[in-house]
Image: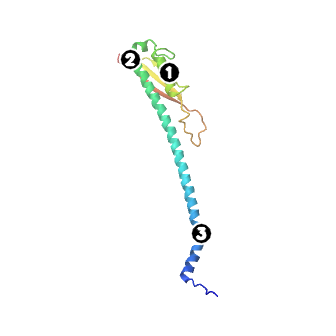
């Protein structure tokens, strides 16, 4: 007959203390993965909002450059300004500028010019639905943006 093995008392106590801990590490890892996943989803949402805002800022900067371009063209041709060469629907510089507006800001974009004495107001409209950031209570889908620039193109001449 075989003699019973003797297990020290300290080993049995450690075995009893460790036994209820089975699977606790796995649960901790799963909770950490869930928290990390939620954080990464939040970062992805922030990145998307950042891209939308960046595109909207790009479009606004293009509109600003286009307004300055028409203003410079008008300053270089004061005779044409006085002779309505820059009225809506005109040819020449104005037609080239209108084509640039559509090319840079997309289809449906349009520019208008209003002359009032020596003052000129250049307004540019475009559809900014790609850069439109919807908030929780925002139910409107109108994403038409307008940039207005006032100048005196031939004030010094």
Q: Is residue 76 left or right of residue 50?
A: left
Residue 112 visible in the picture: no
Q: Secondary structure at mark 1?
A: helix
Q: How far, Cα to Cα, is label 2 from label 1?
A: 19 Å
Identify the image quadrant of the N terminus.
bottom right
Q: How far, Cα to Cα, is label 1 from label 3?
A: 72 Å
Residue that extends furthest to the left in the rendered view of this protein: 156
- Ranked by sequence position, the earlier of labels 3 and 2 is 3
Q: Which residue is mark 3?
A: 22
Q: Tell me where residue 50 appears, x and y as whole percent.
A: 50, 41
Residue that extends furthest to the right in the rendered view of this protein: 1
Q: Is residue 103 left or right of residue 118?
A: right
Q: Which residue is mark 1?
A: 99
Q: Are marks 2 and 1 in contact (CB under 8 Å)?
A: no
Q: Tell me where residue 106 appears, x and y as whole percent.
A: 53, 27
Q: How far, Cα to Cα, is label 3 from label 2?
A: 83 Å
- Ranked by sequence position, the earlier of labels 2 and 1 is 2
Q: Tell me where residue 96 appears, x and y as whole percent.
A: 47, 19
Number of dots carrying numbers: 3
Dot label at residue 136: none
Q: Is residue 56 above or below residue 115?
A: below
Identify the image quadrant of the C terminus.
top left
Q: Which residue is mark 2?
A: 76
């Amino acid at each position: 007959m075989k003699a019973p093995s003797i297990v020290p008392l300290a080993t049995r106590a450690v075995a009893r203390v460790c036994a209820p801990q089975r699977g606790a590490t796995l649960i901790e890892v799963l909770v950490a993965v869930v928290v990390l996943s939620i954080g990464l989803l939040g970062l992805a949402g922030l990145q998307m909002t950042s891209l939308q805002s960046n595109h909207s800022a790009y479009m606004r900067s293009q509109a600003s450059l286009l307004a300055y371009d028409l203003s410079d063209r008008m300053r270089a041709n004061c005779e044409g300004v006085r002779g309505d060469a820059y009225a809506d629907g005109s040819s020449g510089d104005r037609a080239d500028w209108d084509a640039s507006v559509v090319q840079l800001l997309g289809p449906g974009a349009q520019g208008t010019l209003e002359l009032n004495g020596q003052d000129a107001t250049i307004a540019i409209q475009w559809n900014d639905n790609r850069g439109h950031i919807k908030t929780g209570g925002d139910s409107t889908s109108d994403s038409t943006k307008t940039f207005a620039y006032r100048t005196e193109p031939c004030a010094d001449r």
